[in-house]
Image (cartoon, grey):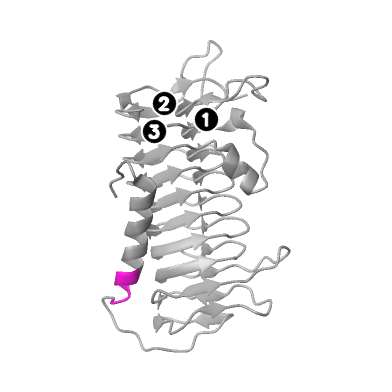
């Protein structure tokens, strides 16, 4: 995915166009009337209408191992009241796949569990109470998917060896993307814009993860924080942030601009300053002490090394 000066609009247009066109599909599953609360077994399935939940089924749709669901451009709407924890689409077992549609108003929009090896393709996931996409297993792929306006993170990965390619996280109430521990996860050719906290964060002693060729801009955004009812605490934030204890990660060929953060807790009375690349792993003298590899990253078009300072 290439991002021009009108990057957000180009990204959104590309994903939406992909969803509309992808309905033509590479396979032709038998149409069926899928309702909220459906549990779909191995085989091909395809929506013929929007799915809107009206009773407290949890989740809206479950895919068991080997199930392939084409949303066919339709919307799955959990229609959750504030206290509901109904999930949107949950992938269980091994080798399930969902693609080509929209998931809204759920607790977590898509939850990837089980033995992994699942695929999530060409979705728009928005306005969910917690995460847009939650990855809880290994060897999964999330491709050509947009996650926006969720109360917490756009994409939350806490498994190993997952791949996110050509994805967009925008206007989420916490991080755009977070790798929450785990190893050998990859985020490539993706973008994070206007999220409340970090654009992309590697946290919780995550190691050997890769961030390659991503575009990260205008995160640490107080307007987004306010819209999602989050406090704006900018000393946490940066465009790309590797937290203390996360090591041996690879950060290469990323472009950043306009991300905000602070060096001291509270950032008061001074306003937040631009902070694009941050490595929180430092020794007693304030020098980088992480074994993370930062290479050929750019801040406002110029090659730059990360700030190596503790965030607290």
**What is the number of the mark on residue 256?**
3
31 relative to 26 in the view: left or right:
right
Q: Residue beneath label 1, please?
A: 260
Which element is circle 2 on?
loop
Which image quarter holds the C terminus? top right
- Tell me if residue 12 comes above or below residue 101 in the rendering: above
Residue 23, percent from left and from top: 33, 75
> Gap between marks 1 and 3, in whole Å?
11 Å
Q: Quick one: SS at disc 1?
A: strand
Count of numbered badges drawn on the protein: 3
Q: Nearer the viewer, residue 98 or 65?
A: 98
Q: As drawn, is 24 to the left or to the right of 268?
A: left
Q: Residue at x 31, y 71 (%)?
A: 22
Q: Residues within 10 Å of mark 1 (few under 14, many from 20)?
A: many
**Residue 139 in view in this figure:** yes
Q: Earlier in the sequence, mark 3 or mark 2?
A: 3
- Residue located at (35% from left, 45% from top): 7
Rendered image: mark on residue 63: none
State the residue in front, 247 or 228.
228
Label 3 – label 2 distance at C-alpha: 21 Å
Residue drawn at x 49%, y 58% is: 137
Q: Position of residue 33 (x, y in %)?
A: 48, 89
Residue pointed to by mark 2 = 291
- The magenta span reads 20-24
Q: Position of residue 209 (x, y in %)?
A: 41, 41
- In the depicted structure, whether residue 68 falls above or below residue 119: below
Q: Nearer the viewer, mark 1 or mark 2?
A: 1
Rate crowding at label 2 as few (under 14), some (14 to 19) or many (20 or more) other CA atoms within 10 Å: few
Nearer the N terminus, badge 1 or badge 2?
1
Viewer can see residue 164 = no
Q: Residue furthest left?
A: 26
């Amino acid at each position: 995915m290439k991002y021009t000066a009108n990057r957000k609009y180009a990204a959104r247009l590309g994903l939406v166009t992909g969803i509309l066109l992808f309905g033509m599909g590479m396979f032709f599953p038998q149409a069926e009337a899928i309702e909220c609360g459906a549990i779909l077994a191995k085989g091909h399935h395809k929506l013929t209408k929007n799915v809107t939940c009206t009773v407290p089924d949890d989740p809206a749709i479950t895919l068991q191992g080997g199930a392939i669901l084409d949303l066919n451009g339709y919307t799955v709407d959990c229609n959750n009241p504030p206290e509901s924890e109904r999930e949107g689409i949950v992938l269980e077992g091994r080798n399930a796949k969902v693609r080509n549609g929209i998931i809204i108003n759920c607790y977590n929009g898509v939850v990837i569990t089980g033995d992994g090896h699942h695929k999530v393709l060409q979705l728009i996931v928005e306005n969910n109470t917690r995460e847009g996409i939650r990855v809880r297993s290994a060897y999964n792929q999330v491709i050509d998917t947009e996650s926006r306006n969720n109360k917490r993170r756009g994409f939350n990965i806490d498994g190993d060896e997952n791949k996110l390619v050509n994805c967009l996280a925008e206007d989420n109430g916490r991080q755009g993307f977070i790798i929450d521990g785990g190893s050998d996860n990859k985020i490539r050719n993706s973008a994070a814009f206007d999220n409340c906290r970090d654009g992309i964060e590697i946290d919780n002693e995550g190691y050997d993860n890769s961030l390659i060729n991503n575009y990260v801009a205008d995160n640490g955004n107080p307007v987004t924080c306010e819209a999602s009812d989050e406090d704006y605490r900018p000393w946490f934030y940066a465009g790309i942030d590797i937290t203390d204890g996360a090591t041996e990660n690879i950060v290469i060929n990323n472009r950043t601009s306009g991300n905000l953060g602070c060096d001291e807790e509270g950032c008061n009375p001074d306003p937040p300053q631009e902070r694009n690349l941050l490595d929180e792993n430092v020794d007693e003298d304030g020098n980088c002490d992480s074994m993370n590899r930062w290479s050929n990253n750019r801040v406002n078009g110029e090659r730059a090394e990360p700030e190596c300072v503790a965030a607290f």
